[in-house]
Amino acid sequence: MIRLPLLSTVIKNLFKPPATNPFPKTEPVPVPENFRGKIVYNVDKCVGCRMCVTVCPAGVFVYLPEIRKVALWTGRCVFCKQCVDVCPTGALQMSDEFLLASYDKYDEKFIYVTPEEAQEIKKKLEEKKKAKSKSKAQ
Ligand code: SF4
Ligand code: SF4
């Protein structure tokens, strides 16, 4: 005798709606709490301690000694969250963002603190320094 133990399940499933999420026609499946998405860097909170440079296993960070900040290329990130855990000021956070496909590996969405931005920060720091020494001299 032929046994077909799955037949009743197959017939039942034929009358049920699909269980898949037809993205991109719909929203993606929501991410859970504490999801590890794209790194977010708040340059103003950074104190240049270099802890993130030390712990990152993927070489995402470059220390910029002139401005005591870091530059990031998140195209290398493996989403391990070690930099977030070690950062003493909360300058690094993990976002919910995970739709990161791009045709350009140096897409600006992967970069924090471009050489131009670093120059801007340097200029501002120098102006601040000048203003401080001026007010001291008065
Ligand atoms: S999450 Fe991990 S791999 Fe990504 S930047 Fe932080 S330490 Fe580096
Ligand atoms: S660990 Fe945080 S404060 Fe220290 S250099 Fe990195 S981002 Fe800046």
Image (spheres, rainbow, N blue to C red):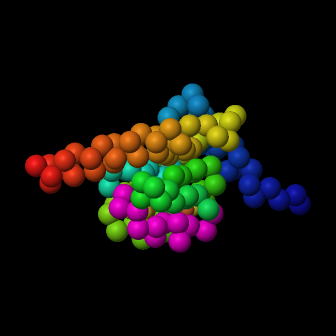
Which quadrant does the N terminus fall into? bottom right
Q: Is residue 1 visible?
A: yes
> Given the current orientation, which residue lies at the most extreme front position?
137
Regarding ligand 1, which quadrant of the image does it lie in?
A: bottom right
Name the residue located 44 percent from the left edge and 50 percent from the top edge. 40
Region in magenta: 46-58
Name the residue located 51 percent from the left edge and 52 percent from the top edge. 71
Image quadrant in which you'd find residue 3: bottom right
Q: Position of residue 26 (x, y in %)?
A: 53, 31
Name the residue located 42 percent from the left edge and 58 percent from the top edge. 68
User: Magenta stretch: dominant SS?
Assistant: loop
Q: Position of residue 39 (x, y in %)?
A: 48, 52
Front residue of 119 and 39: 119
Image quadrant in which you'd find residue 90: bottom left
Q: Position of residue 76 (x, y in %)?
A: 64, 54
Q: Find out whether residue 20 is within the magenta segment.
A: no
Labels in figure, total: 0
Q: Is residue 62 left or right of residue 102?
A: left
Front residue of 126 and 79: 126
